[in-house]
Image (cartoon, rainbow, N blue to C red):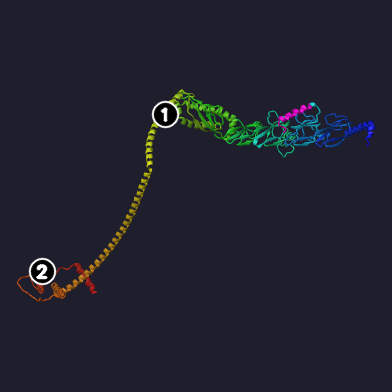
């Protein structure tokens, strides 16, 4: 194009520029661009159907805010008929919650605090929301994490970081800020998170729905069955289903345990309380404030109150055993009852571990001799876990039992004991009183469903230093000290003796080596002597045994030899006797043959004489013979002759020359003759 034309015709140039600008302006009214990260809210300015009669959103094409949104891209619109409000997409960050406020819809009834979304629940479809009966105001349904294309003329979205809305009136901002402050106060921008390490449960208070009946303090549990989809509200996360199930406004009996819950805090708030922990050695007696009225199961003979079954209102007959419980302490309370032995101390300034006796003091007595001592004592008590509900139902708690029943009962018992004894007897008979009281008071404690284990009595005192009781005790102590001194002196005497023994032992210890060696030497010699003695005993026993055997042998041999000799002697004697008898018989016969024994004798003498002469070779007749007158000499022949003559002379003189025969010899002779004749 030739630019000189514009310089020659400047007026026409101006008109052309103005026409071009007008065309561009006109074109911009026809074509609108919406970025992809935004939405266009259409406000219709001119409509043949007129303006909206009721509400804010024009559902029938009237002039006003239109329900449909313009999404990202180019859009063709009639110029001067529409106004486009470009608004950002609604973004709910991860782990956060968004709340909805509807500007248009049905009015809320007086019984509702929040708009129901049972039918109108799609906040991205305004037409469906309004046509299905969606209600204006804060909504029960919340927005979870994500990006939403929402008509911000109809809905206001409140998040922790940003308020998404199309400003229509300045007064609205204050309303939305107050709403945001309430949500922040209830920690509603984030879900309810209960961690396992917290050991807590969530107590839910619902702020919408029908109110509780008169006399009720806790709303009963509803809609907890997941198989009933129409009423299962999934732990208050679906407010409409909770109300359909019959849920009521107020504090709920159902509690939340560990987990994450996306709960609309405008609908329900959550308070975390610690779990109920029943420690080992205790049980928890439940006093329920809610539930149906239960039947009394304590029995006709029990007149101190009622016990009910678990889940009903009253004192539960079954206690909670040791463990952790998600118990709603607004619906009832759990009273801990120790099942281990606990001690109650009637001693000022001393308190047991359970602190049931922190208001107890010593028992004031008046003795028989008018002293007024204070008696410290302790009582060990046990409660059967099965009887714990009876105790709680009867007394309310253990501390009331101690202060209102056990304290006056125990005090009265020992006051009666004190009146029957003097102070000295009270002190000296402490053990007997303790044993007696343990037996007698067991029955009294059993009447209150308690088991008395032991009674421990301390020393009576006046409660002040220098009192009369203390003086008596001082005198008794002085007596005891004197007795102890006597005992001490005796022990010291024994100690001196022991010390002397110790010194002797030390002296011996110094010479222990020599003593040990000498003792060992003595022991060795003793053992050697015992060995020699034992050996000598063995040898003596051996010799004795051998001697005995040898003596027995000699005796037996001697007896044998004697028997042998006897037998041989008898045999020889018999032989000799027989030979002699035989010889005698022969000689006798010879004598008879010779005419008498003297002749036989002469015969034998002569025979022997001849043998002697023959052996000695002596001359029968001497070669030289000398004679004389003297007697006493002569030859052998002369001697024989003289012998014969003497025999003859004997016969002449009448001297018997024979001896009588032996009868035994005669008998033997007879036997021999008989044997010889056989």
Question: What is the x, y in percent for residue 67?
Answer: 83, 33
Name the quadrant of the C terminus: bottom left
The residue carrying mark 1 is 481
Circle number at residue 516: none
Q: Nearer the viewer, residue 375 or 59?
A: 59
Question: In the image, is residue 539 part of the stretch drawn in magenta?
Answer: no
C-alpha span from label 2 to label 1: 133 Å
> Is-magenta flag for residue 184?
yes
Q: As drawn, is 577 to the left or to the right of 439?
A: left
The residue furthest left is: 629
Closer to the N terminus: mark 2 or mark 1? 1
Under tag 1, what secondary structure? helix
Q: Nearer the viewer, residue 314 or 300?
A: 314
- For label 2, the crowd category at 10 Å Cα-Cα, with few meaning under 14, some 14 to 19 and many 20 or more, is few
Q: Secondary structure at mark 2?
A: loop
Is residue 358 something one can see in this rendering? yes
Give the image quarter of residue 288.
Answer: top right
Q: Few, some or many C-alpha atoms within 10 Å of disc 1 (few <14, some 14-19, many ≥20)?
A: few
Query: Magenta span covers which residues?
Result: 171-189
Q: Of residues 331 and 136, which is closer to you in this image?
A: 136
Picture layout, residue 228 above or below residue 609: above
Q: Quadrant of residue 353?
A: top right
Identified at 85% across, 37% down, the residue is: 74
The picture quadrant where one finds residue 603 is bottom left
Q: Position of residue 399 (x, y in %)?
A: 57, 29
Residue 78 x %, y %: 89, 33
Q: Which residue is mark 2?
A: 655
* Residue 248: x %, y % from top left: 72, 31
From the viewer's perspective, is residue 547 above or below residue 275? below
Confirm or deny contact between disc 2 and disc 1 (CB under 8 A): no
């Amino acid at each position: 194009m030739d630019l000189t034309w514009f310089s020659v015709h400047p007026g026409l140039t101006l008109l052309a520029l103005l026409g071009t600008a007008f065309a561009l302006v006109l074109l911009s009214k026809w074509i609108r661009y919406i970025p992809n990260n935004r939405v266009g809210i259409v406000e219709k300015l001119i409509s043949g159907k007129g303006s909206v009669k009721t509400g804010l959103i024009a559902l029938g094409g009237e002039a006003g805010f239109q329900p449909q949104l313009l999404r990202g891209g180019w859009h063709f619109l009639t110029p001067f008929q529409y106004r486009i409000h470009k608004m950002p997409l609604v973004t709910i960050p991860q782990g956060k919650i968004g709340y909805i406020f509807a500007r248009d819809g049905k009015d809320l009834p007086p019984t509702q605090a929040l708009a129901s979304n049972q039918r109108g629940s799609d906040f991205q479809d305004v037409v469906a929301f309004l046509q299905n009966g969606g209600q204006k105001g804060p909504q029960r349904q919340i927005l979870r994490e994500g990006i939403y294309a929402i008509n911000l003329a109809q809905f206001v979205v409140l998040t922790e970081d940003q308020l998404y809305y199309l400003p229509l009136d300045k007064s609205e901002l204050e309303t939305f800020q107050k709403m945001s402050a309430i949500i922040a106060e209830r920690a509603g921008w984030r879900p309810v998170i209960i961690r396992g390490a917290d050991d807590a449960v969530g107590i839910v208070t619902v702020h919408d729905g029908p109110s509780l009946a008169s006399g009720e303090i806790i709303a009963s549990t509803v809609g907890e069955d997941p198989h009933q989809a129409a009423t299962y509200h999934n732990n208050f996360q679906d407010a409409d289903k909770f109300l359909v199930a019959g849920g009521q406004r107020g504090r709920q009996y159902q509690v939340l345990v560990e987990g994450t819950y996306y709960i609309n805090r405008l609908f329900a708030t959550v308070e975390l309380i610690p779990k109920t922990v029943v420690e080992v050695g205790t049980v928890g007696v439940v006093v329920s404030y809610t539930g149906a009225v239960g039947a009394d199961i304590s029995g006709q003979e029990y007149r101190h109150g009622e016990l009910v079954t678990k889940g009903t209102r009253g004192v539960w007959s079954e206690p909670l055993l040791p463990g952790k419980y998600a118990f709603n302490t607004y619906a009832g309370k759990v009273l801990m009852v120790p099942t281990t032995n606990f001690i109650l101390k009637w001693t000022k300034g001393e308190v047991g571990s359970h602190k049931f006796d922190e208001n107890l003091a010593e028992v004031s007595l008046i003795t028989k001799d008018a002293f007024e001592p204070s008696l410290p004592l302790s009582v060990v008590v046990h409660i059967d876990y099965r009887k714990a509900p009876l105790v709680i139902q009867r007394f309310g708690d253990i501390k009331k039992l101690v202060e209102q029943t056990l304290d006056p009962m125990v005090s009265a018992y020992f006051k009666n004991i004190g009146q029957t004894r003097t102070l000295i007897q009270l002190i000296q008979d402490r053990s007997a009183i303790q044993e007696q009281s343990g037996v007698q008071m067991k029955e009294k404690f059993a009447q209150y469903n308690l088991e008395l284990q032991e009674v421990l009595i301390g020393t009576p005192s006046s409660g002040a230093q220098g009192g009369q009781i203390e003086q008596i005790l001082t005198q008794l102590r002085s007596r005891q000290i004197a007795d102890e001194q006597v005992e001490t002196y005796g022990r010291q005497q024994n100690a001196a003796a022991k010390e002397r023994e110790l010194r002797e032992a030390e002296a011996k210890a110094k010479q222990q080596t020599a003593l040990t060696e000498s003792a060992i030497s003595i022991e060795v010699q003793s053992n050697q002597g015992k060995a020699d003695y034992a050996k000598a005993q063995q040898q003596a026993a051996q010799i004795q045994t051998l001697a005995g055997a040898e003596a027995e042998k000699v005796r037996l041999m001697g007896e044998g030899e004697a028997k042998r000799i006897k037998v041989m002697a008898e045999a020889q004697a018999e032989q000799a006797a027989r030979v002699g008898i035989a010889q005698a018989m022969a000689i006798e016969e010879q004598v008879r043959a010779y005419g008498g024994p003297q002749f036989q004798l002469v015969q034998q003498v002569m025979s022997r004489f001849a043998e002697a002469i023959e052996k000695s070779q002596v001359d029968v007749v001497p070669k030289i013979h000398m004679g004389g007158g003297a007697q006493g000499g002569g030859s052998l022949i002369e001697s024989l002759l003289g012998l014969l003559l003497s025999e003859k002379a004997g016969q002449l003189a009448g001297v018997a020359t024979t001896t009588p025969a032996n009868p035994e010899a005669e008998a033997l002779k007879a036997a021999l003759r008989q044997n010889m004749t056989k």
